[in-house]
Image (spheres, rainbow, N blue to C red):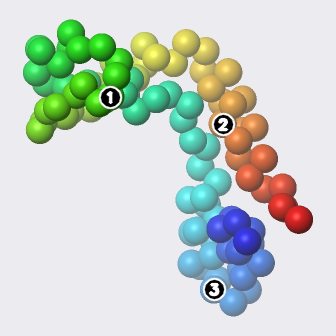
Amino acid sequence: MPPLQYWQFNTVKYGLLAEIATELLTVPSSTVSLERIFATSSPDMASANDDSDSYVCSQITFDPIALIKTIDEPQRMERDAMLRFNRALIPQF
């Protein structure tokens, strides 16, 4: 049974915990790749190609500007997230 469906079926039994779990499980996900969200603090890493196996760095920092630049079309990203979310709600028989 998918986690969201479990918590929806057990709302009466678990009350507030089920409400919190349902709220957290319904947060839309991002379609942006993790490699694009995080940028390294090392100048050598900035010149590395997109192959994640080539990254060897102990200090990784979050770069919000890189995240904003990767979101070409916010409506498309939201649509993709909703499609994934709705697909997860369909029971698998």
Q: Which residue is at the far top?
A: 47
Query: What's the amino acid at mark 3?
Result: Tyr
Please tell me which residue is depicted at 70% across the width and 66% down the height of the picture.
Answer: 2
Query: What's the amino acid at mark 2?
Result: Ala
Q: Position of residue 58 (x, y in %)?
A: 11, 38
Q: Which residue is mark 1?
A: 52
* Numbered disc 1: secondary structure: helix
In the picture, measured across the screen, residue 4 lies left or right of residue 25, that is: right
Of circles 2 and 3, the one toward us is 2
Q: Which residue is mark 3?
A: 14
- What whole-number distance in Å separates the C-alpha atoms at marks 2 and 1? 24 Å
Asked if residue 20 shows in the view, the reply is: yes
Of circles 2 and 1, the one toward us is 1
Lower position in the chain sequence, tag 2 or tag 3:
3
Q: Position of residue 16 (x, y in %)?
A: 59, 79
Q: Which residue is at the far right?
A: 93
Q: Which residue is mark 2?
A: 81
Lower position in the chain sequence, tag 2 or tag 1:
1
In the picture, measured across the screen, residue 4 lies left or right of residue 53, that is: right
Q: Position of residue 77 (x, y in %)?
A: 62, 26
* Numbered disc 2: secondary structure: helix
- Between 16 and 27, the residue placed more toward the observer is 27
To which quarter of the image does residue 22 belong? bottom right
- What whole-number distance in Å separates the C-alpha atoms at marks 1 and 3? 41 Å
Please tell me which residue is depicted at 78% across the width and 47% down the height of the picture.
Answer: 87
